[in-house]
């Protein structure tokens, strides 16, 4: 049965449809806002064998170019692999819904958000969160909660919901926020060095919008009645579980949790688990058919005890697994210039997390071309994040970056991008690569730090240093505790992963994922305040390492300089069919780019070549006035006169009648390469220079009208280049 629900939301009509299309999916809703339309479906694989160790949830975000009235580029002319923006949008849907599935639910589920229509003024990306919530709740798929998401920007002192890309580009804050009616559960975004107070205020404003959307969802879902799928719940035999618990010592777990070093700690805990489980399984009469399941359930129970012990140790004793108190940052070291041939490099190490940042400087032709549903253009600052398996002591495949790598790199790029100078200040394309060499918590924030340091090492005139830190949360029935600079175990077993990056003057990037629904404004304020203090301590170390960008770029970096020519000189610089600019590029071994407004970018391998090309272009475009005199170089000889280059790039004609004496054959008088004095006499209708030659000795001579010219002292040049004097005064 086809149904439609409508609501006015933030100045536009929100229309939800169900029952017309994609009816074979378990859940299917069409969300319309403005002229943007997204179809969201949810399907569970009912016949799949249920797993034990993980929940196979996949989220796909399908960008269809027809939605924007565009045909895809390339030879194939159809959509290919997901774009970076599509992958990020899929992550934004995945992160708030994943914690709301039952913990023991392990059946494969797939969410697909398909963009059917795009209104550039109301981008559809965030509506996939609401659509997924509706599709899951109005289906047989087990799901515990209602969630919604908004995009919010703070522009000129006002909040704008679901801003266009044009508006968001200049916003002081640009966030995607998701949550339930009780709390915010996910945040992703960037800011222009804003205060912690404004960030909290923006989050609360976003949550008000989320609560309004969830009330609308509740109204819609009240019309659906579904019996949720009854999946097999794996449970331990009660007698076996009691035996298992009786053999475990909480004191021994705490002792092993305090083992120094990530791998040593993991091994100590794993060894203790085997010491308990293996003998118990040998003693018990367990059939081979359920042995693997029993072993998994015992292991899962043990992990739950480790989680309880770690959290209790932190909450009650303020003691973390690596011996720190809740507010202490792990030891930090910063090193610069490790790689001799790169344009800039920095190694940032914080505890057992290590990022090697490498900067490469390129020219305009190195920019990334952006061609997505909502954006077209060029991107001159890029940050790429690599997470090889050896960084966590594992083996694994190498290939295209995964969603995690793209997400972490995007967050770090957001943190740094507002510190990159404009193209007019620094005419380079800038690429930063973060190689994660070790990882035990917060490698994305280590990337922010190594990226900032490597930019300064490369001589990029970055405005300020940017640092990042990851915060955690332990939430207990009788209180909560915020942790500074969390490790991987604290992230995995804690209740919040809260990343904040910024300068000494404010926040530049923000990301939060919450596993519990109780994160209030008070918790956010405390977490942001502690993150600020930690960020300042990290920035102090970074400024001590390199307080400002290096004065000179690497000798291996390309040389790029900017100049300009009058618009009416562009054609002259380019020449017919590009002849002039090609010749200039070849002569000085440079690349030259000319814009319609007259701006010129020159790219070369060294200063000397680039400066010569700069001088040539400057002289070519220089304003030359009638009556000015130059020592020129003969560049071409014809029967009717010769051409002389007065300055590099500017050539004019000296007609045979303007050569200062009677001349029968021009080639007998001047040769290519000769130096001659000339004067500007004017310009022809096309703007080309007209010259006359000035004789070195005596008065100027002309041959206008064929009249014979006599002088007491006349110099002639013969083919041998010798001067001969003739005395006509007899």
Image (cartoon, rainbow, N blue to C red):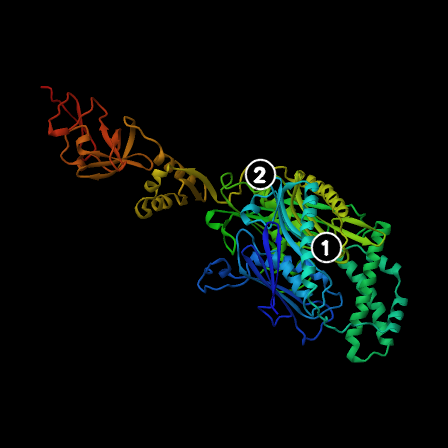
Q: Nearer the viewer, residue 174 or 435?
A: 174
Q: Is residue 593 above or below residue 19?
A: above
Q: Is residue 148 above or below residue 700?
A: below
Q: Nearer the viewer, residue 627 or 122?
A: 122
Q: Nearer the viewer, residue 287 or 673?
A: 287
- Percent coordinates x, y for residue 264 in the rendering: 78, 59
**In the image, what residue occupies the spot 58% across and 40% down?**
462
Using the rendered image of the protein, determine whether residue 337 is visible from the camera's viewpoint.
no
Q: Is residue 487 above or below residue 572?
A: below
**In the image, what residue occupies the spot 84% across and 49% down?**
318
* Neighbours of disc 1 within 10 Å: few (<14), some (14-19), many (20+): many
Q: Residue 109 appears in which quarter of the rendering?
A: bottom right
Closer to the eye: label 2 or 1: 1
**Extreme right residue here?**
246
- Percent coordinates x, y for residue 242 in the rendering: 89, 70
- Percent coordinates x, y for residue 340 in the rendering: 57, 47
- Quick one: SS at disc 2? loop
- Quick one: SS at disc 1? loop
Residue assigned mark 1 = 181
The circle drawn on residue 550 is 2
């Amino acid at each position: 049965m086809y149904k439609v629900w409508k609501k006015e939301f933030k100045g536009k009509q929100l229309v939800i449809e169900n029952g017309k299309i994609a009816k074979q999916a378990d859940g299917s809703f069409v969300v319309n806002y403005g002229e943007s339309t997204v179809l969201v479906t949810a399907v569970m694989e009912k016949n799949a064998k249920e797993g034990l160790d993980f929940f196979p949830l996949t989220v796909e975000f399908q960008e269809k170019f027809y939605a924007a009235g565009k045909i895809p580029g390339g030879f194939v002319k159809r959509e290919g692999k997901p774009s970076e923006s599509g992958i990020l949008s899929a992550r934004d849907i995945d992160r708030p819904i994943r914690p709301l599935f039952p913990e023991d639910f392990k059946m494969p589920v797939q969410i697909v958000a398909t963009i059917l229509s795009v209104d550039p003024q109301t981008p559809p990306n965030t509506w996939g969160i609401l659509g997924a919530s509706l599709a899951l709740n109005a289906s047989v798929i087990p799901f515990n909660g209602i969630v919604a998401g908004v995009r919010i920007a703070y522009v000129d002192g006002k909040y704008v919901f679901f801003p266009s890309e044009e508006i968001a580009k200049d916003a002081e804050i640009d966030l995607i926020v998701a949550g339930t009616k009780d709390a915010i559960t996910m945040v992703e975004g960037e800011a222009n060095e804003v205060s912690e107070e404004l960030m909290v205020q923006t989050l609360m404003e976003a949550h008000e919008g989320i609560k309004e959307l969830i009330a609308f969802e509740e109204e819609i879902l009240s019309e659906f009645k579904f019996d949720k799928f009854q999946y097999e719940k794996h449970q331990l035999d009660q007698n076996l579980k009691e035996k298992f618990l009786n053999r475990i010592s909480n004191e021994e777990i705490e002792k092993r949790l305090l083992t120094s070093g990530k791998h040593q700690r993991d091994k100590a805990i794993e060894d203790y688990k085997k010491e308990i489980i293996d003998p118990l399984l040998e003693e018990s009469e367990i059939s081979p058919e359920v042995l693997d399941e029993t072993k998994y359930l015992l292991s899962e129970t043990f992990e739950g005890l480790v989680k309880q012990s770690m959290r209790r140790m932190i909450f009650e004793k303020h003691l973390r697994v690596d011996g720190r108190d809740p507010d202490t940052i792990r030891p930090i070291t910063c090193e610069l210039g490790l790689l001799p041939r790169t344009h800039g490099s920095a190694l940032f190490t914080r505890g057992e997390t290590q990022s090697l940042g490498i900067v490469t400087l390129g020219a305009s032709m190195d920019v990334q071309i952006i061609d997505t549903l909502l954006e077209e253009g060029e991107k001159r600052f890029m940050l790429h994040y690599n997470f090889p398996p050896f960084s966590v002591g594992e083996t694994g495949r190498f290939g295209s970056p995964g969603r995690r790598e793209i997400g972490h790199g995007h967050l770090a790029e957001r943190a740094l991008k507002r510190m990159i100078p404009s193209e007019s200040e620094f005419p380079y394309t800038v690429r930063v690569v973060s190689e994660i060499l070790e990882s035990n918590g917060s490698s994305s924030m280590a990337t922010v730090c190594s990226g900032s340091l490597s930019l300064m090492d490369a001589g990029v005139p970055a405005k300020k240093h940017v640092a990042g830190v990851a915060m955690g949360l332990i939430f207990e029935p009788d209180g909560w505790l915020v942790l500074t600079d969390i490790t991987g175990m604290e992230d995995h077993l804690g209740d919040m992963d809260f990343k904040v990056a910024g300068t000494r003057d404010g926040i530049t990037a923000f990301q939060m994922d919450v596993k519990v629904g109780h994160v209030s404004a008070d918790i956010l304020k405390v977490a942001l305040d502690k993150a600020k203090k930690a960020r300042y301590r990290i920035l102090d170390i970074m400024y001590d390492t390199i307080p400002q960008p290096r004065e000179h770029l690497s000798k291996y970096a390309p040389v790029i300089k900017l100049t300009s020519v009058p618009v009416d000189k562009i054609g002259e610089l380019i020449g017919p069919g590009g002849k002039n600019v090609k010749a200039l590029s070849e002569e000085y071994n440079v690349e030259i780019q000319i814009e319609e407004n007259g701006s010129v970018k020159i790219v070369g391998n060294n200063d000397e070549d680039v400066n010569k090309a700069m001088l040539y272009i400057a002289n070519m475009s220089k304003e030359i006035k009638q009556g000015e005199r130059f020592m020129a170089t003969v560049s071409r000889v014809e029967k009717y006169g010769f051409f002389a280059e007065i300055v590099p790039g500017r050539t004019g004609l000296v007609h045979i009648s303007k050569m200062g004496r009677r001349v029968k054959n021009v080639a007998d008088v001047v040769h290519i390469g000769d130096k001659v004095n000339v004067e500007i006499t004017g310009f022809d209708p096309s703007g080309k220079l007209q010259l006359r030659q000035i004789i070195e000795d005596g008065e100027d001579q002309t041959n206008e009208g064929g009249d014979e010219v006599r002088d007491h002292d006349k110099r002639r040049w013969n083919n041998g280049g010798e001067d001969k004097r003739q005395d006509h005064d007899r």
